[in-house]
Amino acid sequence: MVSIVALLHGPDRPGIVATIAGWIHEKGGNVIHADQHLDREENVFFQRVEWNVGVGADLEAESRNFAKMAEAELGMQVRTVLSNERPPIVLFVSKADHCFHDLILRWKAEELRGEIVGIVSNHPDLDHSAQEYGVPFLHIPCTEECKVEAEVAQLDFIRENGVGLVVLARYMQVLSENFLNDAGCPIINIHHSFLPSFAGAKPYHQAYRRGVKIIGATAHFVTPELDEGPIIYQDIHRVSHRNGVADLIAKGRDLEKIVLATAVRRQLENRILVYKNKTVVFD
């Protein structure tokens, strides 16, 4: 049965949960999942609620009516989606292929609630692999001299395919602010360090020089500030003085795959609320 999912946040006040549950009950709905969080420092209430409605009900109208109620009566900002929505996804890649293969195989195994409709790359290296998976591959060279033209072509591909999520699966290019403003959908990046430590280029080399005892990977939304976007998910591996740069890179690749896949899955399941430069991620 298709359900409605609502993500909402706004100023905290007494009775929010009761009002929402009561409205759903009065409309003949049945709550199948609800989770909430209160940021006491900001006094902001966050909730993810999912519910079923009666057979034959107009789900889109129900979604709109719920959003109107929550905005008018509770002062909430609301986003609603249907549980069967599978947004088109495009992967941006360069030469590294571990996150590329991992995400496509998870998609093939129906672990992701979306459809990978294309691969965009600034190098031709993964073209053959994409063909084997049956996924369109678009090679768009991107250098300082042709960056503007390259991003125009990339944006055309995104619009033509109605893309709802862009995933930078180790795409080793910085996206311009114009691109971010015009993309029209969330963009998730995997950074191969435990941000905010070791932002920028060659983080494993930075970590080795610093002699760290843990390395990490961070999936975050992309913003104009490099590696500063709201963090979705992070994980770590322990390392020691015996590990060289090559060891850190090898260990890190496993982390990158898991961290990126987790972030993409939670985005596609509509479990993430962004507030200021942080996220609330519902389990």
Image (cartoon, rainbow, N blue to C red):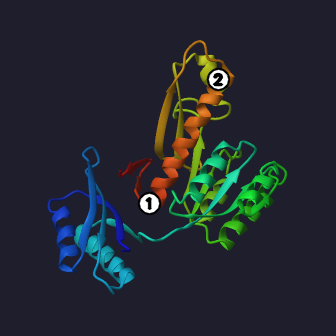
Q: Amino acid at mark 1?
A: Glu
Contact? badges 1 and 2 (CB < 8 Å): no
Whichever of callouts 1 and 2 sits on the residue coming sooner in the sequence is 2
Secondary structure of the residue carrying tag 1 is: loop
- Density class for disc 1 (Cα within 10 Å; few <14, some 14-19, many ≥20) is some
Q: Report x, y in % for residue 89.
A: 60, 62
The answer to whether residue 199 is visible is no
- Residue lying at the far top in this picture: please name it: 241
Q: Report x, y in % for residue 215.
A: 54, 27
Name the quadrant of the N terminus.
bottom left
Q: Report x, y in % for residue 8.
A: 33, 63
**Is 95 left, or right, of 185 in this rendering?**
right
* Real-space Cα separation, disc 1 to disc 2, in angstroms: 34 Å
Mark linked to residue 189: none
Q: Which residue is mark 1?
A: 269
Which residue is at a point 63% across and 64% down the rendered structure image? Answer: 182
**Is 2 left, or right, of 19 in this rendering?**
right
Q: Report x, y in % for residue 217.
A: 54, 36
Which residue is at a point 45% across and 71% down the rendered structure image? Answer: 84
Q: Nearer the viewer, residue 243 or 228?
A: 243
Which residue is at a point 74% across and 64% down the rendered structure image? Answer: 136
Q: Amino acid at mark 2?
A: Asp
Q: Which residue is mark 2?
A: 247
The answer to whether residue 57 is above or below residue 36 is below
**Is 183 left, or right, of 59 in this rendering?**
right
Which residue is at a point 52% across and 42% down the rendered structure image? Answer: 259
